[in-house]
Image (tube, rainbow, N blue to C red):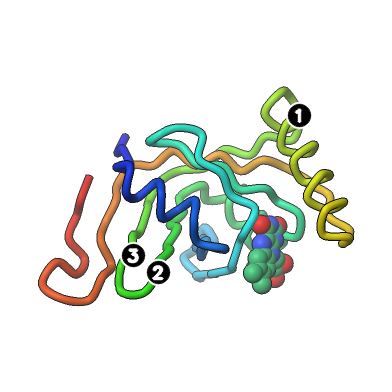
Amino acid sequence: MAQMTERIQTLFAKVPSVVLCTATADGTPNAVPVGAKKIIDAETILISDQFLNKTLANMQSNPRVAVTFWEGHEGYQLKGTVTIETSGPRFEQTARWIDDLSAKLGFPLKSKGAVIMKIEAIYAVAPGPGAGKKLA
Ligand SMILES: Cc1cc2nc3c(=O)[nH]c(=O)nc-3n(C[C@H](O)[C@H](O)[C@H](O)COP(=O)(O)O)c2cc1C
Protein backbone atom coordinates (compact mmCIF):
# COMPACT_ATOMS: atom_id res chain seq x y z
CA MET A 1 0.00 0.00 0.00
CA ALA A 2 1.03 3.66 -0.46
CA GLN A 3 0.13 6.48 1.90
CA MET A 4 -1.02 9.93 0.84
CA THR A 5 0.76 12.77 2.65
CA GLU A 6 -1.31 15.43 4.42
CA ARG A 7 -0.67 17.72 1.44
CA ILE A 8 -1.94 15.15 -1.09
CA GLN A 9 -5.02 14.51 1.07
CA THR A 10 -5.71 18.24 1.36
CA LEU A 11 -5.56 18.69 -2.42
CA PHE A 12 -7.68 15.58 -3.05
CA ALA A 13 -10.37 16.93 -0.70
CA LYS A 14 -10.19 20.44 -2.13
CA VAL A 15 -10.50 19.84 -5.89
CA PRO A 16 -14.12 19.74 -7.08
CA SER A 17 -13.59 16.59 -9.13
CA VAL A 18 -10.93 14.04 -10.04
CA VAL A 19 -10.41 11.90 -13.14
CA LEU A 20 -11.09 8.18 -12.65
CA CYS A 21 -9.36 5.99 -15.23
CA THR A 22 -10.29 2.37 -15.82
CA ALA A 23 -9.69 -0.13 -18.59
CA THR A 24 -11.49 -3.11 -20.02
CA ALA A 25 -9.91 -6.50 -19.38
CA ASP A 26 -8.32 -6.28 -22.86
CA GLY A 27 -6.98 -2.76 -22.28
CA THR A 28 -9.39 -0.24 -23.81
CA PRO A 29 -9.03 2.85 -21.59
CA ASN A 30 -11.84 4.99 -20.14
CA ALA A 31 -11.49 8.25 -18.16
CA VAL A 32 -14.38 10.08 -16.45
CA PRO A 33 -14.79 12.96 -13.97
CA VAL A 34 -16.08 12.14 -10.49
CA GLY A 35 -16.89 14.64 -7.75
CA ALA A 36 -18.49 12.47 -5.05
CA LYS A 37 -15.21 11.44 -3.41
CA LYS A 38 -13.96 11.04 0.14
CA ILE A 39 -10.82 10.08 1.99
CA ILE A 40 -11.27 7.04 4.24
CA ASP A 41 -7.64 7.01 5.42
CA ALA A 42 -4.16 7.80 4.06
CA GLU A 43 -4.22 4.76 1.75
CA THR A 44 -7.92 4.48 0.94
CA ILE A 45 -10.40 6.68 -0.96
CA LEU A 46 -14.11 6.27 -1.69
CA ILE A 47 -16.03 7.32 -4.82
CA SER A 48 -19.81 7.16 -4.98
CA ASP A 49 -21.27 5.60 -8.12
CA GLN A 50 -24.40 7.37 -9.31
CA PHE A 51 -23.93 7.31 -13.07
CA LEU A 52 -20.99 5.04 -13.84
CA ASN A 53 -21.58 2.72 -16.79
CA LYS A 54 -18.49 1.73 -18.77
CA THR A 55 -16.43 2.59 -15.69
CA LEU A 56 -18.47 0.19 -13.54
CA ALA A 57 -18.28 -2.62 -16.11
CA ASN A 58 -14.53 -2.07 -16.38
CA MET A 59 -14.01 -2.16 -12.60
CA GLN A 60 -16.04 -5.37 -12.35
CA SER A 61 -13.80 -7.14 -14.88
CA ASN A 62 -10.54 -5.29 -14.13
CA PRO A 63 -10.30 -3.69 -10.67
CA ARG A 64 -7.03 -1.83 -11.39
CA VAL A 65 -7.63 1.93 -11.67
CA ALA A 66 -5.85 5.28 -11.68
CA VAL A 67 -7.11 8.57 -10.25
CA THR A 68 -5.58 11.91 -11.25
CA PHE A 69 -6.24 15.36 -9.82
CA TRP A 70 -4.54 18.72 -9.85
CA GLU A 71 -4.83 22.39 -9.07
CA GLY A 72 -2.70 24.86 -10.96
CA HIS A 73 0.60 23.13 -11.62
CA GLU A 74 0.43 20.77 -8.63
CA GLY A 75 -1.06 17.35 -9.21
CA TYR A 76 -0.95 13.67 -8.30
CA GLN A 77 -1.74 10.28 -9.76
CA LEU A 78 -2.95 7.46 -7.53
CA LYS A 79 -2.87 3.86 -8.74
CA GLY A 80 -4.59 1.02 -7.01
CA THR A 81 -7.29 -1.61 -6.86
CA VAL A 82 -11.00 -1.16 -6.20
CA THR A 83 -13.73 -3.14 -4.54
CA ILE A 84 -17.37 -2.14 -4.97
CA GLU A 85 -19.76 -2.23 -2.02
CA THR A 86 -23.51 -2.17 -2.70
CA SER A 87 -24.61 -3.14 0.82
CA GLY A 88 -23.28 -2.87 4.35
CA PRO A 89 -22.47 0.08 6.61
CA ARG A 90 -20.06 1.85 4.27
CA PHE A 91 -22.58 1.74 1.41
CA GLU A 92 -25.45 2.87 3.71
CA GLN A 93 -23.35 5.82 4.86
CA THR A 94 -22.51 6.72 1.25
CA ALA A 95 -26.18 6.46 0.23
CA ARG A 96 -27.14 8.88 3.04
CA TRP A 97 -24.37 11.29 2.05
CA ILE A 98 -25.58 11.32 -1.58
CA ASP A 99 -29.25 11.67 -0.52
CA ASP A 100 -28.25 14.73 1.53
CA LEU A 101 -26.22 16.13 -1.37
CA SER A 102 -29.16 15.58 -3.70
CA ALA A 103 -31.48 17.51 -1.36
CA LYS A 104 -28.93 20.29 -0.97
CA LEU A 105 -28.38 20.65 -4.73
CA GLY A 106 -32.06 20.14 -5.65
CA PHE A 107 -30.89 17.60 -8.24
CA PRO A 108 -31.82 13.90 -8.30
CA LEU A 109 -28.86 11.77 -7.20
CA LYS A 110 -28.89 8.20 -5.89
CA SER A 111 -25.82 6.20 -4.97
CA LYS A 112 -25.69 2.73 -6.57
CA GLY A 113 -22.46 1.77 -4.86
CA ALA A 114 -19.38 2.79 -2.93
CA VAL A 115 -16.17 2.31 -4.89
CA ILE A 116 -13.36 1.72 -2.40
CA MET A 117 -9.87 2.24 -3.81
CA LYS A 118 -6.80 0.93 -2.00
CA ILE A 119 -3.85 3.05 -3.11
CA GLU A 120 -0.80 1.07 -4.18
CA ALA A 121 1.38 3.79 -5.74
CA ILE A 122 1.45 7.58 -5.93
CA TYR A 123 3.16 9.70 -8.60
CA ALA A 124 3.61 13.44 -9.08
CA VAL A 125 2.22 14.88 -12.32
CA ALA A 126 3.41 18.50 -11.95
CA PRO A 127 5.38 19.70 -14.96
CA GLY A 128 9.10 20.18 -14.40
CA PRO A 129 12.01 18.13 -13.12
CA GLY A 130 9.86 15.99 -10.77
CA ALA A 131 7.32 15.09 -13.47
CA GLY A 132 6.15 11.51 -13.15
CA LYS A 133 8.29 10.90 -10.03
CA LYS A 134 7.08 8.04 -7.84
CA LEU A 135 6.31 9.50 -4.40
CA ALA A 136 5.09 6.40 -2.60
C1 LIG B 1 -17.96 17.32 -12.81
C2 LIG B 1 -18.56 15.95 -12.87
C3 LIG B 1 -18.59 15.19 -11.70
C4 LIG B 1 -19.16 13.91 -11.72
N1 LIG B 1 -19.17 13.17 -10.58
C5 LIG B 1 -19.67 11.90 -10.60
C6 LIG B 1 -19.64 11.10 -9.42
O1 LIG B 1 -19.14 11.48 -8.37
N2 LIG B 1 -20.18 9.86 -9.50
C7 LIG B 1 -20.74 9.37 -10.67
O2 LIG B 1 -21.21 8.23 -10.67
N3 LIG B 1 -20.75 10.11 -11.78
C8 LIG B 1 -20.23 11.35 -11.78
N4 LIG B 1 -20.24 12.11 -12.92
C9 LIG B 1 -20.84 11.54 -14.12
C10 LIG B 1 -19.93 10.56 -14.86
O3 LIG B 1 -18.65 11.10 -15.08
C11 LIG B 1 -20.62 10.28 -16.22
O4 LIG B 1 -21.87 9.70 -16.00
C12 LIG B 1 -19.83 9.44 -17.17
O5 LIG B 1 -20.50 9.56 -18.40
C13 LIG B 1 -19.77 7.96 -16.84
O6 LIG B 1 -19.16 7.40 -17.96
P1 LIG B 1 -18.84 5.87 -18.19
O7 LIG B 1 -19.98 5.30 -18.96
O8 LIG B 1 -17.60 5.92 -19.00
O9 LIG B 1 -18.68 5.23 -16.85
C14 LIG B 1 -19.69 13.40 -12.92
C15 LIG B 1 -19.63 14.16 -14.09
C16 LIG B 1 -19.08 15.42 -14.06
C17 LIG B 1 -19.04 16.23 -15.34
57 shown above or below 39: below
**Which residue is located at x 78 percent, y 50 percent?**
101
In the drawing, what numbered circle is on residue 87? 1
Q: Amino acid at mark 2?
A: Glu
Residue 132 percent location from the top left of the image: 21, 66
Give the side of residue 122 with respect to residue 104, left or right: left
Ligand 1's quadrant: bottom right
Are the residues at dot 2 and dot 1 in contact (C-beta closer than 8 Å)? no
Of the image marks 2 and 1, the number of the one nearer the N terminus: 2
Depicted 109 relative to depicted 90: above or below: below
Q: Does the residue at mark 3 contact the one at mark 2 (Cβ under 8 Å)?
A: yes
Read off the residue under disc 2.
Answer: 71
Residue 43: quarter of image: top left
Q: Point out the tag, 1 or 3, that comes first from the N-terminus.
A: 3
Mark 3 sits on what residue?
75
Secondary structure at badge 2 equals strand
Neighbours of disc 1 within 10 Å: few (<14), some (14-19), many (20+): few
SS for dot 3: strand
Instruction: Give the crowd class for mark 2: few <14, some 14-19, many >=20 residues within 10 Å.
Output: few
